[in-house]
Image: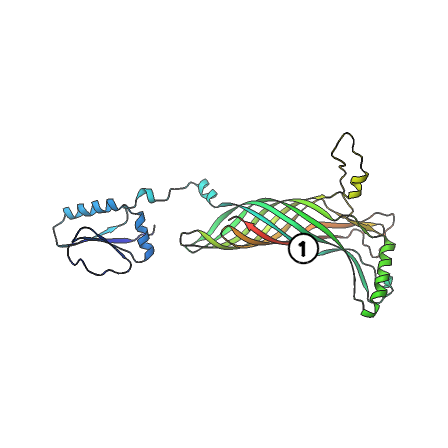
Amino acid sequence: MNPIFLSLGMLLSHPNSNAAADTIILNAGDNSKVIFYGKSADDLKNLELLDLNKIIKDLNQKQNDSDPAQHQHVKLDEKGFVNPSSQEPTLNWKQRYLQNTFLNLHIGKGTDVNRFVFFQPAPSLLNHPTARLTSEIVLQNKLTTNLSVVHDEKLLDRPKVAISLRYGLGVGFNIQRYLHWNLVQDVPALDVNEVTTRAHELLQKEGIVPFQSDFNAFQGFVHFAPRISLKDSKGRSTFYASAGVRLNYNKIIENVIPSQYASSMSVNSTRGGTIANHGPVTSGGGYGVYSENSNFGVSYLAEIGYKWIGVFVNYDPGYVTLNTKLNANQDRPTSGFSQFKTDKIGYISFGVKLGR
């Protein structure tokens, strides 16, 4: 409680004297009043913390020990008159740490932010000077969920605003999908039908076939983010905003191709086939695209909200690493395929955040 001074007077005359708006007057009999004065309404609220019985006893004692007077003005400092039951208990370091530790839940979905080009033949293979054909893989985020425990280390704490460094640990589960795109670009309107036909013939000749679509992933992460929050009159956090980074470990679980379930043999079991598929994601022309089953990466998270509910945006530019490998006996550098090509594809997701 901020130090304030309260003036208490036993007024034996002028019972109808006016008082300021920030003054509380307590009638004590026909000719006596007790006046509580503060500089603001917040100061007067602090009277709830004072032991008024102790104040009155001390006032009577001072009057008994002094010379009688029709008007006596006694000034008392609040020190020593705070009611012990109204004081906040002293917390140890563990209690203070847990007081600023929170559980957060994120639920959302998203879409792709970059792409992996598997096949890009020269325009001459389409018998056209400018036409460009690409066979690409992008990443769609169907569902992202994560649960984290975070702690706010206060850097600045003021009555109306607080700035802190938020850090913590979390785990998540994501459902992603590979989208396979064949794109023809830079073609004049008069040549569209002719070039499209040639593109289909070239893709068929190379035998480009997508194999994988949906896959799942478990994620563990460490979270760091500066955070600013506004406070209400009781010192509780209201509106907040934060932006920071996550250091992620992703473990990818590729879904089994349906035909592998049908062709597998289950012996002495009623649970069916257990064959796992580890690629390729797509293949053609003697080449295949394969994904790494686990990796480390960095993502960026921004949040804004009110009290325990908010919204978030998570940007992960390098979620999955894809690379092209040669499945045949001979590399064909001019075919439009690139052996040993490695690149990362990611996603951006957005959704709801629950928790402080």
Q: Total number of numbered labels?
A: 1
Q: Is residue 47 left or right of residue 12?
A: right
Please report the residue visible at 77 percent of the width from the left and 52 percent of the height from the top: 341
Q: Is residue 38 left or right of residue 141?
A: left
Give the amino acid at mark 1.
Answer: Thr
Judging depth in this view, the residue of 331 and 187 nearest the camera is: 187
Residue 59 picture location, percent across and down? 20, 48
Residue 34, can we see it?
A: yes
Mark 1 crowdedness (10 Å alpha carbons): few <14, some 14-19, many ≥20: some
Q: Is residue 296 left or right of residue 352?
A: right
Residue 171 picture location, percent across and down? 60, 44
Residue sitting at the far top? 268
Residue 334, can we see it?
A: no
Asked if 99 appears above or below 124 in the picture, the reply is: above
Residue 204 picture location, percent across and down? 86, 55
Please report the residue visible at 60 percent of the width from the left and 53 percent of the height from the top: 351
Judging depth in this view, the residue of 346 and 261 nearest the camera is: 261
Please report the residue visible at 16 percent of the width from the left and 48 percent of the height from the top: 63
Residue 44 picture location, percent across and down? 30, 54
Residue identified by numbered label 1: 111
Please, what secondary structure does the residue beneath circle 1 have?
strand
